Image (tube, helix red, strand yellow):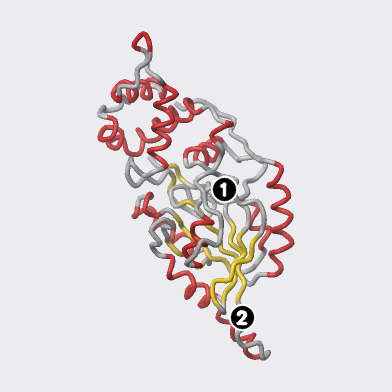
Amino acid sequence: MSIEMNIQWFPGHMTKARRMMEEQVRMVDAVCEIVDARIPESSRNPEIADMVGDRPRVMILNRVDQADPEITKAWAAYYREKGYAVLETDSQSGKGVDAFGPLLKKLLHHKIEQNKAKGMIGKPLRAMVVGIPNVGKSSFINRVAKRRAAIASDRPGVTRGKQWIRIDEGLELLDTPGILWPKFDNQTVGENLAFTGAVKDDILDRETLAANLLLRLRESCSDRIGSRYKFQPDPEADGYTLLETAGRKRGFLISGGEVDLERMAAVLLDEFRGGKLGRITLEYPPVGEDATPAQSG
């Protein structure tokens, strides 16, 4: 059983950013929402839906290289059924990114035709790119633009203001700050965001977070723990015991032969986020219209 954690992070600049997005959304033809393919629903800001209204939407499942490919396919089908255009990408390698422009123009075909009918041939399409912190939004934009147009970082909260970026003569993107929402619905959502780095580590108890991650991994892919940390997790052990065992196997010992849990926690989180434990998705698509996303395992 995981240890309860009160995970909340909503810096003041996010309120300002949300107001800016509410004002700017009226100027765009479509909204492109980037999510982390490992936690697609947990990485969606529920306030975005009200913010963008009925504008055409592109759902971009990013970091597919770190997610389970079969579950990613299921998520893509799920979002298409909801009426979204869907793109599977890896911003680091550029996989799937080249399909973005054609997909967006296909989605906005009627808008292009309307512009032609009004004599506004060549008027660029405008799309707002939204996403929570640390889902690879700026890296995605840089790949689409084929230049360093947006500041990219593996730390959440780097992009603070809006920025219009011209992709070509027919397309402009509005880069926006990554924003969370004031209160996470439940512990699982908060944990998923913390596991993947969308919440700043500075505010977290990393040892408890790592212990809880090991419990989740034991449920869904215990073989990954065995291959990476050289032990088979005891099905009855708590998360701290698993973390201690992993640290001992790695040789992270301090005076008296005790395990350096802080160091092991940092390594586990970094290796999970870096994909060194393999392609792991932490939640499945909902089953049934009113279902909530199922957790992996």
State the separation of the CA atoms marked 1 and 2.
30 Å
- Residue lying furthest top: 256
At which x and y percent is residue 25?
A: 69, 64
User: Is disc 2 placed on a helix, strand or loop?
Assistant: helix
| In the image, residue 297 above or below residue 175 | above
At which x and y percent is residue 270?
A: 41, 37
At x 51% / y 77%, what residue is drawn? 106
Q: Nearer the viewer, residue 113 or 101?
A: 101
Q: Quadrant of residue 110?
A: bottom right
Question: Residue 22 has which mark?
Answer: none
Q: Amino acid at mark 2?
A: Lys
Q: Nearer the viewer, residue 124 or 84?
A: 124
Question: Residue 111 has which mark?
Answer: 2
- Residue lying furthest front: 148
Mark 2, residues whose alpha carbon is within 10 Å: few (<14), some, or many (≥20)? some
Q: Earlier in the sequence, mark 1 or mark 2?
A: 2
Mark 1, residues whose alpha carbon is within 10 Å: few (<14), some, or many (≥20)? many
| In the image, residue 128 above or below residue 121 | above
Mark 1 or 2, closer to the camera: 1
User: Is disc 1 placed on a helix, strand or loop?
Assistant: loop
Q: Quadrant of residue 171?
A: bottom right
Question: Residue 133 has which mark?
Answer: 1
At x 47% / y 38%, what residue is drawn? 195
Q: How many marks?
A: 2
Q: Amino acid at mark 1?
A: Pro
Q: Nearer the viewer, residue 34 or 154?
A: 154
